[in-house]
Amino acid sequence: MSDKQVSPDPAPETSLFEERLRAARQKQGLDPVPKDGAQAGRDASAMGLGLRVGVELVAALVVALLIGWALDRWLNTRPVFLAVFALLGGVAGMINVWRVVKPPP
Amino acid sequence: MAAESHSMDVLGQFALKPVLGSVGAAVQFTQSNAMMLAAAAVTLGLLYFGMRPRALVPGRLQAAAEMGYSFIHDMCVEQVGEEGKRYFPFVFAVFFFVLMGNLLGLIPGMFTFTSHIAVTFALALTVWVVTTVVALKIHGLHFFSYFFPAGVPIVLAPLIVVIEVISYLSRPVSLAVRLFANMVAGHVMFELFASFVVMLAAALGVVGGVLALGPLAINVALVGFELLVCFLQAYVFAILTCIYLHDAVHLH
């Protein structure tokens, strides 16, 4: 440690030391690299994730279109509900996708 | 000319055929049903014969059975919480039924029952109904607050509720389509590349036979890839079941 600059309180010093210790331990392979496992798993199933997102997006839309179509058939209002539910289905699909990809709390 | 005699029928492999002779035909017992029974039998066999030695240091079969058990057990506890243990049998059954269906389908000549959307949709619908019943049983009518997240302005209620209901209804659809599409795509690719091998060899003779090594190699690599997909899709099916159960138990 150089004495050139004296830190005002010991807290930054400690955190600096902790940081260096962590970096050194990581370099020596003593600590598991944080999030590495999760990242590797995510990369390996990137195609799976992509497919999942695509299916989520389409599934909500299909369900919404079915509901809209059925409501129109029932109430003889074609194409009001079909149009409305197409939009709502797109939104629901987006929400589904967000729930898949959002970072865990 | 040669191509016409070897016209590709990549979807023919998914056709249902009755088995067990006239008895099977009379009750519409198809190879799909036979494979379902086989999947259940293999799962039970793995557990029974795997755990029979009850060795302190497990052999390979016992290790597989124990790993399967603890894998699903940990998944339930991790995803749902301590209450998840109650749903362990259900998740275990779903996971192994899908996994064995996928894996047995990889054996040449066997049928993949998870490649039929009727089967996957029935499975997904079962999961969906079970999670909904669990939620209704635990929370009663309070369950319907799930469709209206806290902190949303009341003005948006008509919009949010409809969107959330659509999102909830789309769960079994996405669950079913994902598994079905993965299995169909994999088996179509198998048949596609396998028919390339035959067509090349038939059309170009010796040169074609050499060229056919290309698609053959791709097919070999595909088997490895499909093994991954089999496990991955069974895992995804099981973990989504757990996530839905978590939602049902905790309502967010």
Image (cartoon, coloured by chain):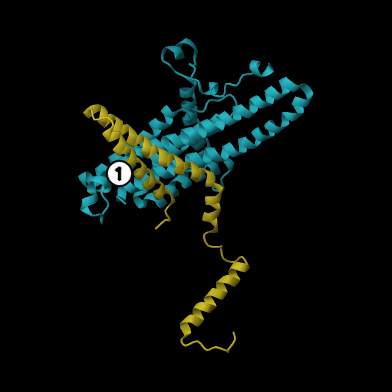
| Residue B138 visible somewhere in the drawing | no
Is A12 above or below relative to A102? Answer: below
The chain drawn in yellow is: A
Percent across and percent down for residue B171 are 37, 40
Q: Look at 38% across and 30% down and name the residue there.
A: B122
Task: Say which amino acid is labelled 1.
Answer: Ile
Compared across the picture, whether B49 is left or right of A82 comes to: right
Q: Residues within 10 Å of mark 1 (few under 14, many from 20)?
A: many
Q: Which residue is mark 1?
A: B163
| Quadrant of image for the N terminus of chain B | top right
Percent across and percent down for residue B79 are 40, 50
Name the one closer to the observer, B215 or B106.
Answer: B215
Q: Look at 79% across and 24% down and name the residue there.
A: B206
Compared across the picture, whether A62 is left or right of B179 comes to: left
Name the one closer to the observer, B81 or B178.
Answer: B178
Which quadrant of the figure has residue A103? bottom left
Q: Secondary structure at mark 1?
A: helix
| Residue B183 visible somewhere in the drawing | yes
The chain drawn in cyan is: B
Percent across and percent down for residue B49 are 52, 35
